[in-house]
Amino acid sequence: METTLRGVGVSHGVAIGEVRHMGTAVLEPPAKQIPADEAPREQARARQAVEAVANDLIARGNLAGGEAQAVLEAQALMAQDPELVADVERRIAVGSSAERAVYDAFASYRALLANAGEYLAGRVADLDDVRNRIVARLLGVPMPGVPDSDEPYVLIARDLAPADTALLDPSLVLGFVTEEGGPTSHSAILARALGVPAVVALPGATELVEGTVVAVDGSTGDIYVDPDKDRRAELAKAAEERRAALAATSGPGATSDGHKVPLLANVGGPADVEAAVKAGAEGVGLFRTEFLFLDDSKNAPSEEMQVEAYRQVLEAFPEGRVVVRVLDAGADKPLEFLTPADEPNPALGVRGLRTLLAHPDVLHTQLRALATAAEGLPVYLEVMAPMVADRVDAKAFADACRAAGLHAKFGAMVEIPSAALRARSILQEVEFLSLGTNDLAQYTFAADRQIGSVSRLQDPWQPALLDLVAAAADAARAEGKSCGVCGEAASDPLLACVLTGLGVTSLSMGAASIPYVRATLAKYTLAQCERAAAAARATDTADEARRAAQAVLSGE
Ligand code: PEP
Ligand code: MG
């Protein structure tokens, strides 16, 4: 029978399909002793699990082909290493359970590898993955990481980190549902980038049984478990109507009376460019370059690799504007070689621009790569720093850009309340502002963007957040400079009108949201947007702000 659950809808559209779980990290199995007469059975269980995992890795290698096949086959060999298997059996003979024996045998092998020079140390992550697979199999829990499925599915996860999502095959993911995360979490951002429906902050999401059919409505936040025939038909009809309405929109972003608001795309790398161009993006308002740094947890990508990736994005927007954000490492986007491991509160620690100023070589290489990539292209390159707190930060970044010989506009992201409050002072050093409303909400409300239980405070309709947006936009207007929004707030069509009314000069969002925002903005005049913005700011809660803006715009 159909049941309904409700979370927070963060990416429009409807997906219907079977659920598959993102495997969570494998926990350490308890070190309980088993009776001696159970040892042979445990040893057989361990051998079977090793065999099954090795066969699965080989089968997946055959499917993948190329470089991936070589890696998967090497992992299969690791799993079957005779010394390792003998060590597992020895440990079981003296009383370990199969899962504990595997866990411990891999730990001692891992320590050997980790101390054995650079090449072998680099294999430690692969070894850990093999161990996790064998232990998960023995414990009867889902395999860690991205589901192994050849059929499209609805992905269920506690939350998704950028490193997990880099491995997802977009052609298989129909939609996302997560237990944690708010509207600005990486799960939500990724769903919008892929253009798939998503619901976050759904309590109990991870208890949905693997294989259950769900219908995910990413606009309302509703999840229909085992949807009946009528529900499926109703959702399919609504989705079709929406597609038809969106297909009718095109051209640059503007209000109905012609006030231009360029609609730009948020991208994570060259792979996102096609969707951005297709959606009619007028450029890129946020290139999150940290995705290029996720492939190798130990090193930054080489300057040549960076040049290549930046050039591919820049070439896609001839005559257009491309705003590149320099590496934003730390907190929700940790990088092993840059992010301090021992900070008690990473969101308030060395992250974003602070990390880059502590590693000037990484910043310099990135800026030089950008300068090289833009050479000879008719593109308007703009480069901005994440997590700018004050004028000192803004000056340090502008100095670094000049030192790298970059011919571009330099800008600052406004993600910390201090930057919004003192935006005019920051604008003495840089030429534009870009509001990162995701982090700005996190820091304004002291509400971690990764935690579902505080998602109420991550709502970008919060009037206090609107006040800070207004402060930054007013400062930019007074200085004759631009102030865009590249946080997720820009992808909410109604809020996009309010942001326009607050004086924001461009809106950047995941490509899939552009048609929705374009269509809504085109319905109202600038004066209506300004009135909606004033009405929203005059309220006390996010819900009231939303209703007030809606009432103004619908002429109630
Ligand atoms: C933001 O914080 O709003 C932003 C755009 O950056 P990110 O989401 O990548 O932290
Ligand atoms: Mg941010």
Image: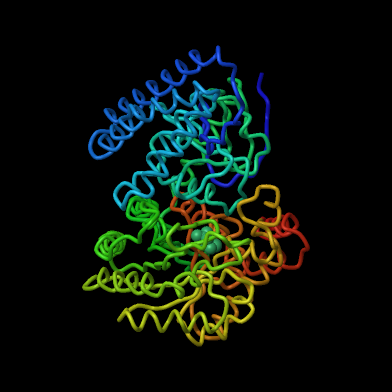
Q: The N terminus lies in which quarter of the figure?
A: top right
Query: Residue 397 location, x and y as percent?
Result: 44, 79
- Taking 194 as reference, is 440 left or right? right
The residue at the point 46 percent across, 52 percent down is 515
Compare residues 224 and 208 and report the one nearer the observer.
Answer: 208
- Taking 392 as reference, is 549 left or right? right
Query: Residue 229 location, x and y as percent?
Result: 58, 20
Query: Residue 465 location, x and y as percent?
Result: 66, 66
Relative to 49, is 25 above or below?
Answer: below
- Taking 505 as reference, is 181 left or right? right
The tally of labels here is 0
The residue at the point 40 percent across, 24 percent down is 50
- Taking 269 as reference, is 535 left or right? right
Figure quadrant of residue 521: bottom right
Query: Residue 335 location, x and y as percent?
Result: 45, 58
Compare residues 393 and 272 and report the one nearer the observer.
Answer: 393
